Image: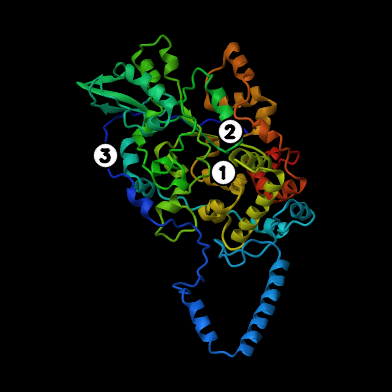
């Protein structure tokens, strides 16, 4: 669905100084992780000391007559065989006496290929009840006040000004620069330390950095820029391929790193949540990613390039597929608060610093997206049967949650997300899109389908360029763009596993149907029903 363009930023130039304030406290890693919903079992006995029980038993046994001992042992043996028979007849659901992370309704989960295929006739989940729960009203989220958003991260809003330079398409501003020639500006950049490709870019930038400074009143200033647009999601929906093709447009200057994951993870000090808190990536490190575009734009400002007018129209962007949906950091940061939903979302901060940003979303049939996600991220013992079992378990967990809590709470719930064997909630596109529309207008968001992109690449990518208002392509660039092979396609070993089971597809189709209907209605496009997939 193609939506129209938004306005550019303000027309007041700002010469912005570095202001340093408090970073996010580094003791977050020491806090216990609290999730938005707490399903932990609270009925487990505490301080149970059983180490002396066997000795007491045998001491007392000596006082009992041999006849009573024989009778007792016969009774004990009989009891054992009765219990063993009962356990053997038990439907296989895992260890009987292990407390579960979630207190869920009991449901039969197949644990073998035979059981999995048998379950295809009668899924062990009540799809009708679940669909009814999902159809509940989508209550509008409570958007936080901008002053509250700003108060959460004073460092971010001390570095980025409220207005950007006029006459430049990208959101850029000047920042006073005081480093001496020869100093390595990027020495401590955390992206550089973890990326060889970005290190190479930094080496190039550093070589002629001082040639791109702006001089005024005896002071030096460097041009800083934010992304003009964001490709925000979803995973396994073609964002990598779109990113690489857009690089071929002469007016688009990406950073070398496709997915910095800064807005959702690294600015909070998380690279992978399972690894815990590591080190917060400063906003300055994030801005360094766009210095290549800033240098090209500065050449246009000073008129040092033959195409200086076109340089002023250069834009940059980033493509972190986590930006649309991933707000897990808040469950780690707000462990002491009783909230069932994230108090702030990534879009609240992006909108606060850049209200005119352009947002690009790539979606795909959520059923196929989930299978592709499973094949890509699971490393061993993959099979259609294993995927089927994991889908059933994930749907059961979500059904248990949504029967007690709001749809949005369960969609964002960190504990639920971490316990689901497959990332089922990433296909609930409508929930995330509605939350993005709570701060950005429809005109600022372009929603595409991977199916259209694959079927008619030239037409679809032209929608993207029209949305970004970039100039037409030369025939040579257009030919290179359309002939470039697809990026990040399914691996050969994964293709050999074949499609998902029909039973799995049926369950997922019914599960996602109410979400797809709401999405198609919102976008006024029946293609988002994915009925023909």
**Relative vertical location of residue 75 with respect to residue 287 in this rendering, above or below:** below
Tell me residue 111's x, y (percent). Answer: 69, 55
**Disc 3/disc 1 C-alpha distance (Å):** 34 Å
Decide: few, some or many residues near mark 2? Use Cα within 10 Å; few <14, some 14-19, many ≥20.
some
Count of picture labels: 3
Among the 4 quarters of the image, the one containing residue 516: top right
**Disc 1/disc 2 C-alpha distance (Å):** 14 Å
**Disc 2/disc 3 C-alpha distance (Å):** 39 Å
Residue lying at the far right in this picture: please name it.
Answer: 121
Task: Say whether disc 3 or disc 1 marks the residue closer to the N-terminus.
Answer: 3
Among the 4 quarters of the image, the one containing residue 191: top left
Which numbered mark, 3 or 1, is in the foreground of this view? 3
Among the 4 quarters of the image, the one containing residue 179: top left
Tell me residue 63's x, y (percent). Answer: 53, 89
Q: Which residue is mark 1?
A: 433
Tell whether label 2 touches label 1 (CB within 8 Å): no
Left or right: 341 as drawn, with respect to 514: left
Which numbered mark, 1 or 2, is in the foreground of this view? 1
Q: Which residue is mark 2?
A: 3
User: Visible in this render: residue 345?
Assistant: no
State the mark number for residue 20: 3
Which numbered mark, 2 or 3, is in the foreground of this view? 3
């Amino acid at each position: 669905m193609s939506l129209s363009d938004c306005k550019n930023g303000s027309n007041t130039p700002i010469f912005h100084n570095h202001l340093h304030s408090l970073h996010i406290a580094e003791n977050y890693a020491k806090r216990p992780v609290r999730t938005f919903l707490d399903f932990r079992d609270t009925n487990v006995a505490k301080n149970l000391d059983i180490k002396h029980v066997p000795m007491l038993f045998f001491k007392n046994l000596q006082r009992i007559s041999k006849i009573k001992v024989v009778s007792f042992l016969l009774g004990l043996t009989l009891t054992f065989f009765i219990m063993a028979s009962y356990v053997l007849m038990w439907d296989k659901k895992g260890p009987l006496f292990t407390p579960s992370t979630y207190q869920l309704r009991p449901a039969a989960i197949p644990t073998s290929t035979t059981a999995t295929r048998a379950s295809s006739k009668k899924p062990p989940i009540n799809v009708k009840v679940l669909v009814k729960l999902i159809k509940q009203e989508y209550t509008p989220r409570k958007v936080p006040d901008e002053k509250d958003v700003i108060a959460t991260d004073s460092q971010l809003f001390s570095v980025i000004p409220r207005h950007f330079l006029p006459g430049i398409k990208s959101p850029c501003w000047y920042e006073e620069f005081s480093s001496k020639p020869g100093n390595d500006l990027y020495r401590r950049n955390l992206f550089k330390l973890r990326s060889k490709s970005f290190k190479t870019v930094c080496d190039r930038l550093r070589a002629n950095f001082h040639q791109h400074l702006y001089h005024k009143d005896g002071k030096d200033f460097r041009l800083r820029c934010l992304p003009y647009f964001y490709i925000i999601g979803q995973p396994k929906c073609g964002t990598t391929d779109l990113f690489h093709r857009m690089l071929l447009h002469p007016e688009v200057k990406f950073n070398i790193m496709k997915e910095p994951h800064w807005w959702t993870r690294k600015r909070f000090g998380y690279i992978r949540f399972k690894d815990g808190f590591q080190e917060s990536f400063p906003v300055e490190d994030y801005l360094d990613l766009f210095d290549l575009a800033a240098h090209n734009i500065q050449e246009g400002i000073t008129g040092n390039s033959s195409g200086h007018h076109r340089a002023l129209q250069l834009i940059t962007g980033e493509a972190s597929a986590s930006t649309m949906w991933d707000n897990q950091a808040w469950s780690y940061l707000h462990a002491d608060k009783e909230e069932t939903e994230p108090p702030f979302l990534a879009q609240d901060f992006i909108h606060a610093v850049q209200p005119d940003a352009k947002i690009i979303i790539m979606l795909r049939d959520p059923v196929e997206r989930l299978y592709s996600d499973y094949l890509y991220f699971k490393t061993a013992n993959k099979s259609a049967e294993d995927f089927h079992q994991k889908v059933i378990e994930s749907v059961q967990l979500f059904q248990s949650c949504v029967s007690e809590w709001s749809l949005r709470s369960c969609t964002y719930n960190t504990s639920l997300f971490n316990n689901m064997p497959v990332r089922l909630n990433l296909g609930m596109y409508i929930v995330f899109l509605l939350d993005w529309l709570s701060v950005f207008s429809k005109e600022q968001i372009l929603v595409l389908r991977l199916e259209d992109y694959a079927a008619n690449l030239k037409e679809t990518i032209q929608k993207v360029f029209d949305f970004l208002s970039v100039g037409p392509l030369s025939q040579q660039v257009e030919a290179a763009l359309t002939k470039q092979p697809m990026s990040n396609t399914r691996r050969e070993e994964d293709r050999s596993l074949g499609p998902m089971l029909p039973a799995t597809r049926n369950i997922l189709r019914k599960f996602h149907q109410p979400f797809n209907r709401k999405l198609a209605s919102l976008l006024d496009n029946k293609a988002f029903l994915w009925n023909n997939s």
